[in-house]
Amino acid sequence: MAAISIRSSQSAFRILLTAAFVVTIGLMWTGYAQPDERILTLRYLLFALSGIVAFSTPYLLFPDEKAPLIQLGNLGNGAVIRYIFVRLAPVVWPVFLLIFVILFGDLSTPGNDLGLKLTHFISGSVLFGATVLFAISRNIKSGTASQFWKESDKGKKIRQHAADYFKYPLDPGSIPSLINTILIALFGAIPILIGTVLAGIYSAVTEAFLMFLMLSLARWSFQSQMKNLVCNYYSTNAFFREFFGSNMKGEELSEKRTVEQLWWVPAPIRMHVWQFLVQLDRVIPSGRVVFSGHVVMLFLAYQQPDAGFLLVAWILFALLHHLFMLMTYRKEISPGWLHGWMASSATWFTARFWMQLRWVLPLLIGMNVQFFIFGTPNYSLQSIVLTVYLIASALMAGIGISGSSTEVKV
């Protein structure tokens, strides 16, 4: 049998551009912060990342267009695991870099508190890695879980009782994702709260020890399904393909968004922007996600932090909007051959950039609602947020031009 190898290739341009973007954001955020401020920022970041990982992991992994090729090659557990890690690597490594910059990107006193910075870097990196590993272990068996909720008598009875009590029918396809989202978010968030208490009572080393315990728990969760990992992977891929495919059938979705509705897009790129938006509507409820983010921002403002912290929070929230643009790099949404056939790279760059302009008005409304209620951010701070958002939009659209590929060779 021929040797099996899995490799990932990213252009040097994309890697350098991503690294430059992450380093710039990290230095802008905490370049002149004090050590305790850096640690607090890292905890806020990890808290947000727990929710992001919980929500985004299934969309990053499934449905997988390479699944038929993997099945044809009859890949074993080890090869499938490497393939999964390879798929997530382009999204995960910038986060580790950001954690490093937050702690060690000290422009005022770079040589101070190196031991403390290193301890919290290890602690934060281990917790983030553990959360990702736990998210993989939970989501990879979503297909098997969906069969329980949809086909088993016990699953049907639970759904019937829930519908009777809450007066709302539960979709068996969405139940596994909902449960996983809650469990993963709690897995990443609760250790931050406990670790903060332990670090205050004892030391940062105690907090790091807790994070290694979480990594052991995540590894145990992953190892527990190794026997059926390949089967679960195929089952989950089929589940998500069917789940997303149900949204692609019929004319209901296409009637929701038409080219003529994109009056704010220049005519030469209107069709291309429409293509991206329709494809994104099929896989992710972007409007609800953004609305939830605005609710979180109001909650943060209710805590009455200083204006500088809220400015950073708004910048981070604005930058998170570009995760939607990352979805347009997936081959099942925008295959490279189709792009090359339909338009030039400059056209697709402009389309992606213009697509992100749709969030400028909601950002302005959200910031001004907060300004009206809490007196911040003022107009000068709002202009900073919008400037960073637009520059980041151009950078992220530029990343898409270089592209990347993940290959499975059998």
Image (spheres, rainbow, N blue to C red):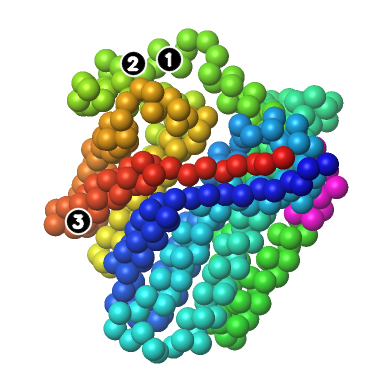
- Residue under circle 1? 254
Q: Are marks 2 and 3 in contact (CB under 8 Å)?
A: no
Q: Position of residue 369 (x, y in %)?
A: 24, 46
Q: Position of residue 298 (x, y in %)?
A: 34, 51
Callout 1: helix, strand or loop? Answer: helix
The amino acid type, in three-letter code, at marker 1 is Ser
The amino acid type, in three-letter code, at marker 3 is Ile
Write the start and end of the magenta stretch as one range. Answer: 222-232
Residue at 31% across / 54% down in the picture? 314
Residue at 79% across / 37% down in the picture? 74
283 in relation to 362, above or below? above
The amino acid type, in three-letter code, at marker 2 is Thr
Image quadrant holding the C terminus, namely: top right
Q: Are marks 2 and 1 in contact (CB under 8 Å)?
A: yes
Q: Which mark is residue 263?
A: none
Residue furthest left in the image: 380
Residue at 37% across / 47% down in the picture? 399
- Magenta: main secondary structure equals helix
- Residue under circle 2? 258
Q: Position of residue 147 (x, y in %)?
A: 77, 29
